[in-house]
Image (spheres, helix red, strand yellow):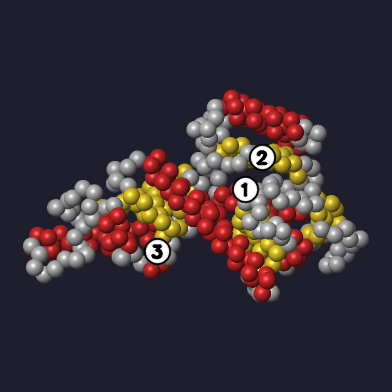
Amino acid sequence: MFDETHLRELAAIESTGPILSIYLNVDPTQHTAEEYKLTLREMLKRVENEADQKDIEAIKQYVDLEYDWSGRGLVMFSRQQDDLWFAFALAIPVRSGITVAQKPYISPLVELNSLYGRYVVGLIDRQGGRFFLLQMGSIVERDGFLGEEVRSKRKGRGSSVVGMRGGAPASGRKDAEVVLRNFRDTAAALNTFCQNRHARRVILAGSEQTLAQFQETLPSTLQSAVAGAFTLDMEANEAEIKEQSFAILQALGEKRKKDLVETVITAAAKGSNGVIRLDETLSAAHEGRIQVLILERGYYQKGYRCTGCSYLTTQKLESCPFCSAEFSEIPDAAEAVVAQVVEKGGAVEVVDDGQMGDARIGALLRY
């Protein structure tokens, strides 16, 4: 199971030789396993003059003999000469691609983790709730809360808490009080579940009326973490929960990226906490100022890295202006800065080509 520990480990890897990084879409709803194996063979053929043959063979052996084809995305990193091997089967699809470089190509994983890493789905009704912790599309923990029984259960409808008047029947008032207590206790249990598991966001599910009333009982910190909601029966299976929450996060991710791009471009134009274009972004990364790095999906740019302090630049300099060490040429400075930002605790967002205009890359700064 992939998590943020693996991401930090991958970001810190340095190698004197080529590392083979592969992302393979294996979504069974789109193509067969044999078709995906053919795609992999075609990708490997493109890099046979760059990658180590031992790494190519390790990838082939894993896919042919070990992978169980249970996921929708497969990510692999190999440098057999240095005993480096990672294979992650993901429950979410990935864009197929192959890279050979001295660092693992982690940008797509960073993007996926920022969107689908550690979120909670709370399936709520008038008596309690079912809680699910998801990591990269897989349910990794389950819990729940069951409150007091509500006698007048009405399938598909919310409680009568809102709008209850003094003239209502006593049984109705009692039901309303029970439901309200259940909502409050369920909200407290959901809040504890999210806090203990460091969930980034929460998605609610249930009937529309139930969720409208339930959200009023949430603590303010949990209300701000709610990313969306969808209608679902309390007895829904886990596949439905995963698919509907996945769709909400996809839409959320697209909107967030659009807003973030606008924020960075505006901040850079005003000379405040934003930079655009590669050279300016590399300088900010070296200073540890990047809070969020943004780069277009297909952006690659040759560059140079200081062998002493790892300063990155697109210029061929005789010596490093910071430590006087020599520079080595690297095939992709944009990918190198991704690893640098992750190592220093920053976030990375990969956007579609064209969203950053001529700049192609930029960053929101901490200060």
Q: Mark 3: which secondary structure?
A: helix
Q: Do the residues under discs 2 and 3 have CB atoms within 8 angstroms?
A: no
Dot 2 corresponds to which residue? 97
Q: Do the residues under discs 1 and 3 have CB atoms within 8 angstroms?
A: no
Dot 1 corresponds to which residue? 108
Task: State which tag comes first along the sequence, 2 or 3.
Answer: 2
Q: Position of residue 2 (x, y in %)?
A: 55, 45
Is residue 325 visible in the rendered image? The answer is no
Whole-angstrom CA distance, mark 2 to mark 1, is 10 Å
Task: State which tag comes first along the sequence, 2 or 1.
Answer: 2
- Three-letter amino acid code of the residue under disc 2: Gly
Picture quadrant where residue 36 is located: top right
Dot 3 corresponds to which residue? 222
Whole-angstrom CA distance, mark 2 to mark 3, is 38 Å
Q: Which one is in front in this view, the residue at disc 1 or the one at disc 3?
A: 1
Q: Is residue 75 left or right of residue 240?
A: right
Task: State which tag comes first along the sequence, 1 or 3.
Answer: 1
In the image, what residue occupies the spot 79% across and 37% down? 50
- Three-letter amino acid code of the residue under disc 1: Pro
- Three-letter amino acid code of the residue under disc 3: Leu
Q: Quadrant of the C terminus?
A: bottom right
In the image, what residue occupies the spot 61% across and 37% down? 24
Q: Position of residue 343 (x, y in %)?
A: 66, 58
- Mark 2, other Cα within 10 Å: few <14 / some 14–19 / many ≥20: some
Q: Position of residue 181 (x, y in %)?
A: 23, 62
Whole-angstrom CA distance, mark 1 to mark 3, is 29 Å
Q: Is residue 165 above or below residue 29?
A: below
Q: Is residue 264 left or right of residue 160?
A: right
Q: Do the residues under discs 2 and 1 have CB atoms within 8 angstroms?
A: yes
